[in-house]
Image (spheres, rainbow, N blue to C red):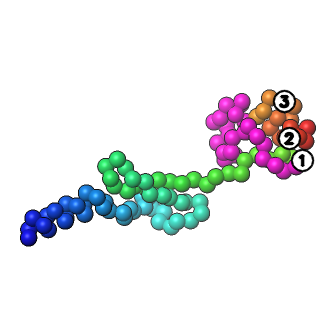
Amino acid sequence: DNYLYFCLRHFLFTIMPDNRWTRVGRHSYNTRSHKSAAIRTPGGSLKQKRVYKTTTGPKCSDCKMALQGIKHIRSSKYHATKKRERTVSRPYGGSCCAVCL
C-alpha cells in the first residue's frame, strides 16, 4: 500500500510539473504595456518572460504601406541599429517606397 502511494506520488511529480508561476517585480498588473508570458526552464519550472509590444514599422509617406527592408523596432531603438538597417540604398529610401518613387 505504501509502495503504491510512493509510485503514484513519484509519477505525479515527475510527469506533471507545477504549472503555477509568479510575476517578478513590483508591477503586478497585466496591462497592455507590461505583458508577460510563462516559459519552462530546463529544470522544469516556469519562470516569467517579459513580452514587449510590437511596432507597425515605418510607412511610405505617399501610400502609407509598410516599407520593405527596414526593421520594425521602436523609435528609441533605431539609434542602436546600423545605418544599412535603417534605410534602403536608393533616393528617398527610408521614407518612400519603390512603387511611389
Which residue range is magenta in the image?
63-86
| Structural crowding at the residue carrying mark 2, measured as other residues with C-alpha within 10 Å and reported as few (<14), some (14–19) or many (≥20) | many
Amino acid type at mark 3: Arg
Q: Position of residue 99 (x, y in %)?
A: 88, 40
Residue 39 horizontal side relative to residue 55, left or right: left
Residue 62's disc is 1
Residue 96's disc is 2
Quadrant of the snapshot with the N terminus: bottom left
Question: Separation of disc 2 and disc 3 at Cα?
Answer: 10 Å
Quadrant location of residue 73?
top right
Q: Secondary structure at mark 3?
A: loop
Chain-order first, disc 1 or disc 2: 1
| Res 76 seen here | no
Quadrant of the snapshot with the C terminus: top right
Residue 90's disc is 3
Quadrant location of residue 96?
top right
Q: Nearer the viewer, residue 13 or 41?
A: 13
Q: Secondary structure at mark 1?
A: loop
Residue 79 horizontal side relative to residue 17, left or right: right
